[in-house]
Image (cartoon, rainbow, N blue to C red):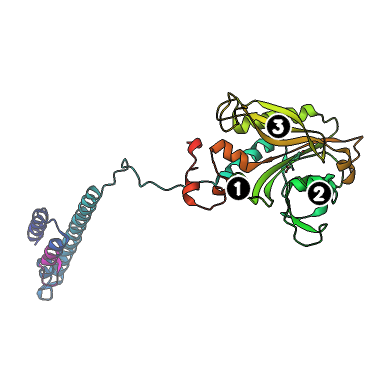
């Protein structure tokens, strides 16, 4: 009996070597361990045996059954591993292949230029201040020293929202933020803000749009002088338009500043030599500024004997047009994706 069991086992061991598929393995398994399999057959005539013999045969067949089952299980694992390995080697992924190009979005040039200014001023300790586009006549003009009937209103052809001139309008300048910031500051202490935003005027040609953007700056503190204004604007222009940029201050007039200046920068197209962009002068006017007028301080609750301030305002569209070489302001607001795509982070790569 023992020899018989041994020979069945060695038969299984040798024939299983040639089996390479799971279905062949199942067939072979049935041949030995199935209902009519040769190992099952061994116990077939048990009932005719003596108790002693029955015990013996039972024990031997059980051991054989366990051993053979284990042999089948091991082979099954081997076959499964081989199937998996073959699959893995066939489905290999080449990680060095170039990926599909992902189309990156691009920031609108106005967003970019605004963020550049904001970054610069935040790094200097300023706060970015936001004001409404619908404003009162008081904030937009009167408290900036431009009373009703003042000729300075003519320079800003304004959209009034009612027939009563003193009521509401679409702000024509971000200088309104000066008034708001001073009035909201209940302690009447120092202020350092920039306010970028949309403004509206009744204008429309290649360099003027009925809606455009400005950025306003206001600093109020003790011992503020023209030197602070000059240094700040020089740094700002160099940061935005390039280190080589030179800045020139010319005396000017704004009702809400005294003294007032207009600021020119060296032409970035010709570097100051003279070209068609700067009309052969080498300079381009970019900004209005000055020391906050004592009356403007007083109207918003500041004592001009204690506090001084400087303010400036510049057109962001003009800056973007210069910096990115945009010839027509209307393309900025035309909403044409082909225009915006040209600013696909070119100068960031
Ligand atoms: N608000 C003026 C404009 O739109 C620009 C300006 C000039 C702003 C002088 C200022 C300033 O803060 O001090 O034309």
Q: Residues within 10 Å of mark 2 (few under 14, many from 20)?
A: many
Disc 1 residue crowd, few under 14, some 14–19, many 20+, Cα 10 Å = few
Q: Is 45 above or below relative to 175? A: below
| Residue identifier under label 2 | 141
Labels in figure, total: 3
Q: Is mark 2 within 8 Å of ligand 1?
A: no
Q: Position of residue 235 (x, y in %)?
A: 67, 29
Sequence-wise, which precedes: disc 3 or disc 1?
Answer: 1
Q: Observer-nearest residue: 29 or 200?
A: 200
Choose top left, top right, bottom left or bottom right for residue 178. top right
Which quadrant of the figure shows ligand 1? Answer: top right
Looking at the rendering, the stretch of residues picked out in magenta corresponds to 27-37
Which one is in front, 314 or 179?
A: 314
Residue identifier under label 1: 205
| Upstream in sequence: badge 2 or badge 3 | 2
Task: For mark 3, give the secondary structure.
Answer: strand
Along the viewing direction, whichever of 207 and 299 lies nearer the viewer = 207
Q: Secondary structure at mark 2?
A: loop
Q: Which sits earlier in the primary sequence, circle 1 or circle 2? A: 2
Mark 3, residue position: 263
């Amino acid at each position: 009996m023992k020899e018989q069991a041994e020979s069945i086992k060695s038969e299984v061991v040798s024939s299983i070597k040639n089996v390479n598929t799971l279905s062949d393995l199942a067939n072979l398994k049935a041949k030995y361990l199935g209902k009519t399999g040769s190992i099952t057959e061994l116990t077939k005539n048990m009932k005719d045996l003596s108790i002693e013999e029955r015990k013996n045969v039972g024990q031997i067949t059980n051991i054989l059954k366990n051993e053979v089952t284990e042999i089948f299980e091991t082979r099954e694992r081997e076959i499964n591993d081989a199937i998996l390995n073959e699959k893995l080697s066939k489905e290999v992924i080449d990680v060095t292949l170039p990926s599909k190009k992902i189309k990156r979005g691009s920031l609108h040039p106005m967003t970019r230029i605004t963020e550049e200014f904001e970054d610069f001023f935040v790094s200097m300790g300023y706060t970015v201040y936001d004001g409404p586009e619908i404003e009162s006549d008081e904030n937009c003009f009167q408290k900036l020293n431009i009373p009703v009937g003042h000729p300075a209103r003519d320079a800003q052809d304004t959209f009034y929202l009612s027939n009563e001139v003193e009521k509401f309008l679409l702000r024509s300048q971000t200088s309104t933020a000066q008034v708001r910031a001073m009035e909201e500051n209940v302690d009447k202490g120092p202020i350092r803000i920039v306010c970028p935003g949309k403004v509206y005027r009744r204008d429309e040609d290649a360099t003027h749009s009925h809606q455009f953007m400005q950025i306003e700056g206001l600093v109020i503190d003790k011992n503020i002088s023209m030197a602070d204004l000059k240094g700040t604007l020089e740094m700002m222009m160099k940061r935005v338009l390039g280190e080589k940029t030179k800045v020139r201050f010319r005396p000017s007039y704004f009702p809400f500043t005294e003294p007032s200046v207009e600021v020119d920068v060296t032409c970035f197209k010709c570097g100051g030599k003279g070209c068609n962009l700067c009309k052969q002068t080498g300079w381009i006017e970019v900004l209005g500024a000055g020391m906050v007028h004592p009356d403007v301080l007083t109207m918003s609750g500041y004592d001009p004997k204690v506090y001084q301030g400087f303010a400036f305002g510049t057109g962001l569209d003009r800056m973007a047009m210069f910096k990115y070489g945009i010839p027509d302001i209307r393309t900025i607001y035309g909403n044409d994706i082909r225009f915006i795509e040209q600013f696909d982070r070119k100068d960031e790569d």
